[in-house]
Image (tube, coloured by chain):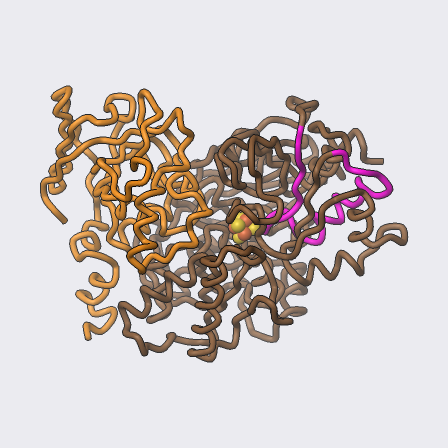
Amino acid sequence: MTITEKVIANHCGRDRVVPGESVWVDVDILMTHDVCGPPTIDIFKREFGQDAKVWDPDKLVILPDHYIFTQNHHANRNVQLLRAFAQEHDLPHYYDVGSPRYKGVCHMALAEEGFNRPGSLLIGTDSHTCTSGAFGMFSTGVGNTDAALIMGTGKIWLRVPETMRFIFEGALPPYLMAKDLILAVIGDIGCDGATYRAMEFDGESVYSLSMQERMTLTNMAIEAGGKNGIIAPDETTIEYVHARTDHGFECIYSDDDSRYHSEYRYDVSTLEPVVAKPHRPDNRASVLEVAGTRLDRAYVGSCTGGKLEDFEAAAQIIKGQEVVIDTYIVPATTEISESLRTEHIDGTSLWDIFANAGCKMGQASCAACLGGPPDTFGRMQGDEVVISTTNRNFPGRMGSKQASVFLASPLTVAASALSGLITDPREVLV
Amino acid sequence: MQSIIRGLAYVVGDAIDTDQIIPAEHLVYSLQKPDERRMYGRYAMSGVPIDQQGLPDGHIPFTDPDKYHSDYTFVIGGANFGCGSSREHAPFALTEAGAQVVIAESYARIFYRNTIDGGFVIPFESHEKINDQIRTRDELELDTQIGQLTNHRTGQEYLLKPLGDVADILNAGNVFEYARQNGLISSS
Ligand code: SF4
């Protein structure tokens, strides 16, 4: 069996499951946020009663992150609803806005707070819940109804997915990042190339990546339609998890005789920096093909492109220079935000590198990654052309339907911010 | 599940993502409060680029401005309908607007699951591409039991793919009713 099949089997009390069959599994962690949490709670109360109890308060994690720093009163009401629910149920894992516990973008917060543990099964009301699969666990996104059923019972039905295997070999050149690898994969197989399937990432180049970079790979499994992305655990995983939680976990690996739907191999040393052109994540082009395209904006942020290493990469290019277009810096979490002030390159903090370069500094949250209310930080309002480290560029995704979004690695985004034109990072990396 | 469904078609292209079905800025409305939930009907499909709204001609809104209810019973799409986010607000918005059925060549997984588990629109799959054969405002008739679709304008008939085991959940109404009927949750 593959790692995905084994984790599912372990959670339905079976020795073996086969792709295609539907099983009811026990959920280890249910995650929700401010957009889907309130309607999930409404359905939970409708179906289980106004006074119903959450199946296991210790397994429910609520992370407001989407529409946080806005005057929109409907958005603010959502946070109030979560707060009231957390109080009513005495939930230990609620990370309230405005409190010292506030974290920011849910998928990064799950990792930082130790909820991502090898061998476990995590469901979230957010399509990028597949991010957690970087920790050798099964994770996927669902809607409010499924989440409400879990809230009451701890259970969900899953159809066991077939697994596609992506093997990366060779040494990653300094001008490439995990974002280039996953955009290459999505460009190859298309936005629905992995629909209903697991995407297992394997190979020496994957295991040479940090946990942050691995999460960039699994985060975008959904952009190929994948049900989950998954990477077997290794020393790097175990070290990260031990540093974040005392909770036990079980490392699970695919068998040598596992059956795969298909297998793709990449020699990363031969790949090039790439972008996804408007308006689809699979609309791949090499940076060289679109180099010189005029830009209005650059954006570094989100669960896939707003991690500490993403800012380190961008800062390495921007340090000592000035950006020539509006450039937004949005750390995914408060922990990353603090690190921007404590991590230095040549004696200057990352925060100062960006601020001195004229970047606009945002607060930890999803911000303009998904548009949101008109006063959202960095949101597109017109026909801007933007290059962004986020994960989606569908029409209107970052706010305005007229805007055009190119997706790229933090290196490519930073290089482009300095020139106002799409620029290959190889031109500026020393 | 109603056995015969009749109504008008609203045709869109491939890869209609959830931001096109219901743009993110509208997700702040309550799905419960009547004066707010109707906003989902008003803004359903409003994220589709204007020249692709209601093919083949485009420029036809799914819900007329200042209305909360759509004229269209059937949404006809292409490949990968509902890709993108996990927002259940997407099938909810289509249902709130009055749509009953989506027919597409293929679906993104979470959208498909949400339509079924939540008991919203019925998601049928076509064997071949049909969004280039049906025009917006064509009168359609669907026999949900055998999956036969008839286009009254052209007389063309299409046999759609069987719903498979999810039909049990659709027939129960939603996943909660299904779970109750099967003893997975108590039926109090
Ligand atoms: S950062 Fe963007 S992709 Fe990630 S959870 Fe927030 S809105 Fe979704």
Residue at the farthest right position: A347
Any part of residue A14 in sight: no
**Chain assigned brown:** A
Q: Nearer the viewer, residue A355 or A221?
A: A355
Residue span colored magenta? A295-324
User: Does residue A8 sit above or below A204 in this rendering?
Assistant: below
Q: Quadrant of residue A321?
A: top right
Residue A317: in magenta span: yes
Q: Residue at x 81, y 32 (%)?
A: A428
Q: Position of residue A311 (x, y in %)?
A: 73, 49
Specify the quadrant that holds the C terminus of chain A.
top right
What residue appears at the point 46 percent right and 74 percent down from the top-left corner?
A86
Q: Give me the residue at 53% from left, 46% from top.
A: A374
**How many labels sit on residues?**
0
Q: Where's residue A59, x and y in %? A: 46, 72
Q: Which chain is orange?
A: B
Q: Position of residue A95 (x, y in %)?
A: 56, 69
Q: Is residue B79 above or below residue B67?
A: above
Q: Residue at x 55, y 67 (%)?
A: A115
Closest to the observer, A178 or B22: B22
